[in-house]
Amino acid sequence: MGEPSPAGRFGQFGGRFVPETLVPACEDLEAEFRAAWGDPAFRAELDGILRDYGGRPSPVTECHRLSDRLGVRVLLKREDLNHTGSHKINNVIGQTLLARRMGKTRIVAETGAGQHGVATATACALFGLECKVYMGEVDVARQALNVFRMRLLGAEVEPVVSGSRTLKDAVNEAMRDWVATVETTHYCLGSVMGPHPYPWMVREFQRVIGDEARAQCLAVLGRDPDVVAACVGGGSNAAGIFSGFVGTGAELVGVEPAGGAAIGRGIPGVVHGSKSFLLQDEYGQVLEAHSISAGLDYPGVGPEHAHLASIGRARYEAVTDDEVVAAFQVLSRLEGIIPALEPAHAIAWLLRAAPGIQGRTVLVNLSGRGDKDVAQMMERLG
Amino acid sequence: MSDPAPPPERPAEAGTLERTLRGARAAGRNLLVPYVTGGLGADWPDVVRAVAAAGADAIEIGIPFSDPVMDGPTIQAASERALAQGATPVAILDQLASLDAGVPLAVMTYYNLVFRAGHQRFAESLAAAGVSAAILPDLPLDEAGPWCVAADAGGVETVLLAAPTGSDERLRRICRRSRGFVYGVGLLGVTGERADLAATATTIARRLKGLTDLPVLVGIGVSNAAQAAAVSREADGVVVGSALVRRVLEGGGPEAAHAFVAELRAGLDGR
Ligand SMILES: Cc1ncc(COP(=O)(O)O)c(C=O)c1O
């Protein structure tokens, strides 16, 4: 997965569709990221923090009982073992280091499931930056534990009451904040979406997942896996693991929630700064997504995924909430790993696809752990 | 990779909106462009007529979008309410076509509605409804090329926004390409009423006036007659949105809209 074009395009997708006030900030961010990414001192500091604070490298776990059950050899990339419980920390450490380089003193972020918010609040505590996190009111209710964690870490959590009161509206509100505070504030966007350079920058910060996983697979398997699967909301954990395998023969599978399948059911559109697939009505009004998992409850998808889908390099499948709940239980029972509901989507696809891929090897990105979802599942499963 | 082509040169001939505003300015008048949310309440066309009668030089008609990132709470609420009442771009343009406000109209909306309809079709539908211009706050100069081609061909003036964060060089490029007027963003922030006028409102006006002969209007945060008068000492005029929309949201109707715009008019006229 290469660099986007000068205007931030992956094929026909991407771009920088933001209020004029933010254009110079996006240009500055792009220049700063380019300089930092090419600066060995920056890379060394980032790697050091991800190792000593974040807990990298995360292991790859071979799932023997699940493999026996499915007739498919299953490996998990264990991003759930990262500090703060998901892959989100990789991107956030990168962006907060950049913000510090740019002399910004304040960070705003949006969050759906709360994992990106918790990661952002954590990094802000670590670096002494002021932090405000926007979260849809609906998500505040279903992810109460993460709201408390963010507040404990010193962040201000602002419930968003407009629109669908979920992730999409939290993004709107974070952007509005950024428009007003752009001189002192960095917007720490949580996925491979938004205006250029975010989709590219966030993917580069998540590339570590794929680079590590490829080397680990070679060590365990002596070759690349046949299939690499990951859940897709905005698409950052998937972009991270895909980037390690896009140059191999591995099949890439992104798994969307059935009620929020931007690639499966969307058409090209422009929202939140980039052109991509989008759930929308005949006039272009953005439709609300519906997913059991707050982190995937988003009507759009990162532009690079739209591009990978349109050139056929990656395939995108949708799973239902019921399949996700079943997968959540299966992984817990068979492997002693309680996954977050988001990566349970990727497991759900695997359970469904297994009969058709007997004997093959599948690497699944386990993007986060399920602690945050246990209360919600307790209510559902009794 | 298909990067968008930069916008073509601005057409040599000024459109209706620009000619009207230049004419009024030449007559020594401070310009007033109020914003009305299309589809907000069954009587919204009467609100538009009332605003025209009260002394607007042109009127901005908002076509509501589900995710208006440049708008604060008031216009967001108005957009949500209008959408809940069934407002669509097609219905709003149909009503504008038979409105006959007597002043030029500019549509303010977000780019996805344009992209979804198709550039050419959207431009043609504006022209067919008698709309002179379009303002698309999430379509900055760098992405505006394809739309400008269609808008120019369809006789629609594209008003560009110029923000306090822009370099002189960027503001110059924006002024060179904007049609109708150039929209100076009065503050760092989204639409909404503010108790005090931001210092940026006069600074951006002064910077833009130094770069262009186009009418320079400042909007975002201009909330009352005194603020409008203060801004228009530097700018050619003002755009006022939230303060007017709030009155309509509160149930004020055409009379309240008329009274408020008349107040702004008086302030701008130094009365
Ligand atoms: C564990 C986990 N996985 C995945 C996601 C979805 O994000 P993305 O699609 O950007 O990887 C989230 C978002 O909150 C998450 O918490």
Image (tube, coloured by chain):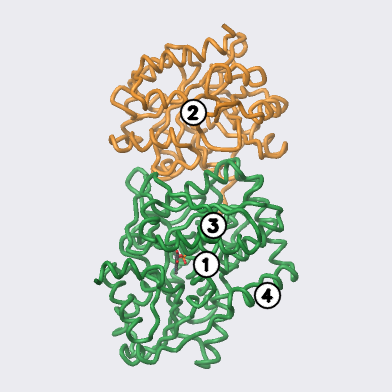
Residue labelled with disc 2: B133
Does the image show residue A315?
no
Q: Position of residue A341 (x, y in %)?
A: 37, 70
Extreme residue in the front direction = A152
Tell me if the residue at label 1 has its CB under 8 Å from ligand 1. yes
Mark closer to the chain start, 3 or 1: 1
Say which residue appears at 37% left-offset and 29% top-offset. Answer: B38
- Pick whichever, B194 or A359, lies toward us: B194
Using the rendered image, report if marks 4 and 1 lie on a common chain. Answer: yes
Using the rendered image, report if marks 3 and 2 lie on a common chain. Answer: no
Badge 2: chain ID: B
- Pick whichever, B137 or A142, lies toward us: A142
Q: Nearer the viewer, mark 3 or mark 2?
A: 3
Extreme residue in the left direction = A382
Q: Is A316 positioned to the left or the right of A79 in the image?
A: left
Q: Position of residue A159 (x, y in %)?
A: 43, 49
The N terminus of chain B is located in which quarter? bottom right
Q: Nearer the viewer, mark 2 or mark 1?
A: 1
Checking the image for residue A48, the label placed there is 4
Q: Position of residue A101 (x, y in %)?
A: 71, 58
Residue labelled with disc 1: A88
Badge 3: chain ID: A
Mark closer to the chain start, 4 or 3: 4
- Say which chain is orange: B
Using the rendered view, name the quadrant where residue A253 is placed.
Answer: bottom left
Disc 3 from disc 2: Cα separation: 33 Å
Disc 2 from disc 4: Cα separation: 54 Å
Checking the image for residue A189, the label placed there is 3
